[in-house]
Image: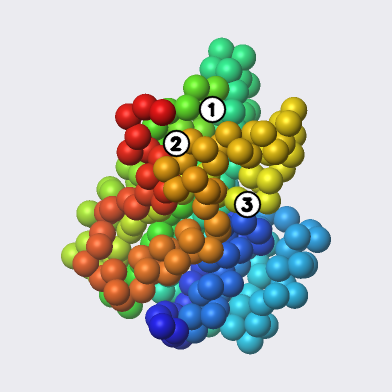
Amino acid sequence: MVNRIKDKVAIVTGSTQGIGAAIAQLFVEEGAYVVYNSHADDGVAAAMRSTMDPERSLFVQGDVADPQQMRALVSRTVERFGRVDIVINNAGINVFADPLSMSREQWQRCFNVDLDGAWNVTQAALPHMLEQGAGSVVNIASVHGHKIIPGCFPYPVAKHALLGLTKSLGIEYAARGIRVNSISPGLIMTENTRKWLSEAPDPAAEEARQTAILPTKRIGEPREVAYTALFLASDEARFINATDILIDGGRTALYHE
């Protein structure tokens, strides 16, 4: 099936690599106009530009933690493509720290990006969606919003809050044509995951260990998350709202290993 979101206009934040890039690329393939984003206009962003159709896409640099920059991102989207139908809040950062030695700056940056970032983009896009009486917001959350892994504080706190934001906004605007849902990926083989594995004392052994604890006996791929984002963004999911979908190969359903 193709053209599932034909001529829809989508904003995908944090989308020059990993899950975000997979979503942006799939959306263009499925007929959408896509504004993709990163906090930096660097070599990674340049590489992404080389893969995207310039007639159906636009790169906008901006930090999701800055409300003014996100208002500008939405304004540029409307100027270029005339509307906003879909927002995919993918931008995020990992902040893992000991609770008692963590700095105030680490705490703030985690929430500024992982929670406030999603709200900043959504808040800027909502007036346009409400005016047209339709819109789909998909927040990229995490299995950390469902289960706690020791040593990962405060990241799970922000992701739990993002699930709350999803449900609250989904209910708040349901009767006005706006759907807000989220996706919680588990271990996905992104560039950051490859880097993390490469830094292990024995990278091959660590990858084998991580694979073995997954019921599927394999690590997920960014494209697999992208297909779920596509479904939630499309009219096929028009009666799905204020809901989170886990994409973790069944890992969080295990009681023990």
- CA distance for labels 2 and 3: 17 Å
Pointer 3: residues within 10 angstroms few (<14), some, or many (20+)? Answer: some
Circle 1 SS class: loop
- CA distance for labels 3 and 1: 18 Å
User: Going 43% across and 63% down the picture, which residue do you hit?
Assistant: 229
- CA distance for labels 1 and 2: 9 Å
Dot label at residue 92: none
Along the line of sight, which residue is nearer the eye, 200 or 47? 200
Dot label at residue 144: 2
Along the line of sight, which residue is nearer the eye, 206 or 97? 206
Q: Residue extending furthest right?
A: 43
In this orientation, does residue 5 appear?
A: yes
Q: Which residue is mark 3?
A: 190
Asked if marks 1 and 2 touch (Cβ < 8 Å), the reply is yes
User: Where residue 254 sits in the image (x, y, percent)?
Assistant: 35, 34
Q: What amino acid is found at the position of numbered circle 1 in the picture?
A: Cys
Q: Residue extending furthest left?
A: 175
Pointer 2: residues within 10 angstroms few (<14), some, or many (20+)? Answer: many
In this picture, is 241 found above or below 80?
above
User: Going 40% across and 59% down the picture, which residue do you hit?
Assistant: 138
User: Where residue 84 sits in the image (x, y, percent)?
Assistant: 44, 74
In this picture, is 192 found above or below 19?
above
